[in-house]
Each structure stands twice: as structure tokens, then as C-alpha cells.
Image (cartoon, grey):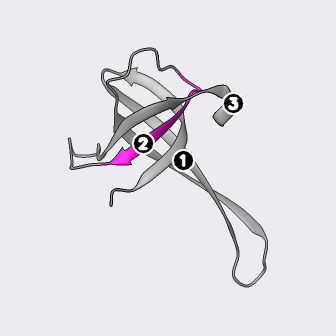
Amino acid sequence: MAQTLTGKIVSTKMSLTVVVLVERKFRHPKYHKVILRHKKYKAHNEIKGIKMNDYVVIQETRPLSKEKKFIVIQKLDKKAQ
């Protein structure tokens, strides 16, 4: 099963590639504080009309280049965020 992530687009400067910021929250095992971690993924984009600060769903796929291993599946509307 391919991994599916939801994140915010932070860059659209490349052609057919977007940079997606994915945030995750988890509780520290010892101190029980909620910690926020984030990671940027480069994803292949064929969907028209995607711009910065949009939320998208990306899915893991075969390597498309050295750093691109995800594709954009769908754009989320404002209510789904």
C-alpha cells in the first residue's frame, strides 16, 4: 500500500513539480509534551490551478527523479483542511 500524506504547498517555482510541507504531531514518550515536526517533499504535479498555500494530498510512487518520489493526487478545498 502506497503512503498517502496531506500537506501545504510552499513552492511552485519548478515546472511540473511542487514542494509540499507535511506536518505531524506526536507526544514525547517521556515528557508527554506534544511536539510538531515538519518535512518537505517534492511532488510531481499535473493538476492545473494549484498555487502556494493550497492543501493537497500526495501519494508515494516509483522514483520519478533523484528527489521526486510522490505525486499530487488531489487538491483539498478550504472546508476539508
Amino acid type, mark 2: Ile
State which quarter of the image contains the C terminus. Answer: top right
Q: Which residue is mark 1?
A: 22
**Magenta residues: mostly which secondary structure?**
strand
Instruction: Give the magenta range.
Output: 52-60
User: Is 35 left, or right, of 40 in this rendering?
Assistant: right
Structural distance between the alpha carbons of marks 2 and 1: 10 Å
Determine whether the residue tagged by mark 2 lies in a helix, strand or loop. strand
Q: Residue at x 29, y 47 (%)?
A: 69
Q: Is residue 12 magenta?
A: no
Query: How far apart in space, not on screen, are marks 3 and 1 (Cα)?
Result: 18 Å
Q: Closest to the observer: 20 or 74?
A: 74
Comparing labels 3 and 1, the label whose residue is closer to the camera: 3
What residue lies at 33% left-to-right and 56% top-to-bottom? 2
- Which residue is at the far bottom? 30
How many angstroms separate mark 2 from mark 3 (CA)? 18 Å
Residue 23 falls left or right of residue 68: right
- Residue with the mark numbered 2: 58
Q: Earlier in the sequence, mark 2 or mark 1?
A: 1
Q: Amino acid at mark 3?
A: Lys
Q: Circles 2 and 1: CB distance less than 8 Å?
A: yes
Determine the secondary structure under disc 1.
strand
- The x and y percentages for residue 18 are 40, 30
Image quarter where the N terminus lies is: bottom left
Q: On the image, numbered disc 3 is attached to which residue?
A: 79
